[in-house]
Image (cartoon, helix red, strand yellow):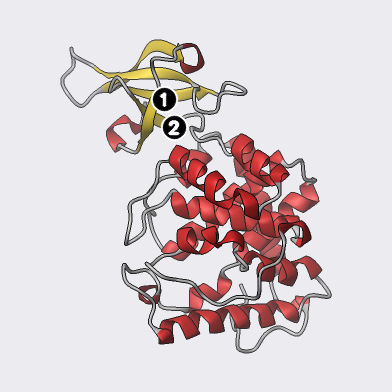
Amino acid sequence: MYTDLNAPPKSIRDVPFSRIFSMAEMILFSLVNCKDILAEVMRPTYLGDYFLFHTLNVAFLSCQAAIGLGLTYEELVQVCVVALLHDIGMKFIDPKSFIHSGVLTEKQRREINGRFDETCRFFENIKDDIPFLINVVEEEKIRLGGGGNKHNACCQDISVTYKEKTPYQKWHMYAQIICGCNTFEALCHDRPFRKAYHPTDAMRIFVEECKSSYDRQFIRAIIESITLYPITSLVRLNNNRIARVIDIVEGCPLSPVVAIIAEKESEGKGEYVLTGEVIDLSQKPNIFIEGLVYDEKYMKH
């Protein structure tokens, strides 16, 4: 990828966007064909580089929400491309400058603002070829309603100065999708100053604190399309049993169909199998999911 923000491209030919668009198409293919991908997206800890995993997570979630909105294939690819590029400027900042439990120094604040301005100049030079890119990136950074900043933050205070607020009715839909999914992704993941929220709590916080900042159609789409318990994900029930989600019940996003996992008694501890016991939680109001499980000993079953 072209990365010299100080010498922005003069033409679309200077940027290998074909590779970025190909990556966007691969992400869409994965969403459709890998049912467990969203379970990994909502894993509370990043398995590697913060920037890489955060960016990919936002791209997957944005595509899923865009699918829920009924966007065309071309529009889905465009949403994914913007999601992959929206924070490109942060790649050139030492993560220690903004991933910490303290408050931003004035120098750190200026650096973040400066990189955002450079990113906009970078995309400004190719707006004739991809006009939606610069508009969406700028709008996404507005962070309407005040909820976006504090939840997207990697440190206690990242209230960076962006352009003045704009009513959501004037927003580009892509900007709402990426901004909303950015916030939800941040809530679902650990930060130096707080633990990750359970996806259910993350969605509740997002809706309660940010609903006035987004179009109702988008709020409905993100609730209905981003399954909090994706198929194949592992969950812990309130009776302390571990189960694997095997089906989604339409209209009951918090109560999927699960298959119970249990320890083999005859072959020693550490061996786990699916018991064959299947429970439709939508029909069992006294049994509910307490949280997702990311324990390797259960993963192969």
Q: Is residue 236 left or right of residue 202?
A: left
Q: Earlier in the sequence, mark 1 or mark 2?
A: 2
Judge whether residue 267 can be spotted in this image.
yes
- The residue at which mark 1 appears reads as 244
Across and down, in percent, residue 269 comes to: 17, 23
Quadrant, the N terminus: bottom right
The kind of residue tagged 1 is: Arg
Q: Is residue 203 left or right of residue 154?
A: right
Q: Is residue 211 left or right of residue 97?
A: right
Disc 1 to disc 2: CB gap under 8 Å: yes
Across and down, in percent, residue 88 comes to: 57, 71
246 lies above or below 143:
above
The kind of residue tagged 2 is: Ser
Quadrant, the C terminus: top left
195, 161: nearer the viewer: 161
Quick one: SS at disc 2? loop
Quick one: SS at disc 1? strand
160 lies above or below 191:
below
226 lies above or below 85:
above
Residue at x 31% of width, y 67% of height? 101
Across and down, in percent, residue 107 comes to: 42, 87
Residue at x 59% of width, y 64% of height? 143
Judge whether residue 78 can be spotted in this image.
no
Residue 233's tag is 2
Across and down, in percent, residue 286 comes to: 39, 14
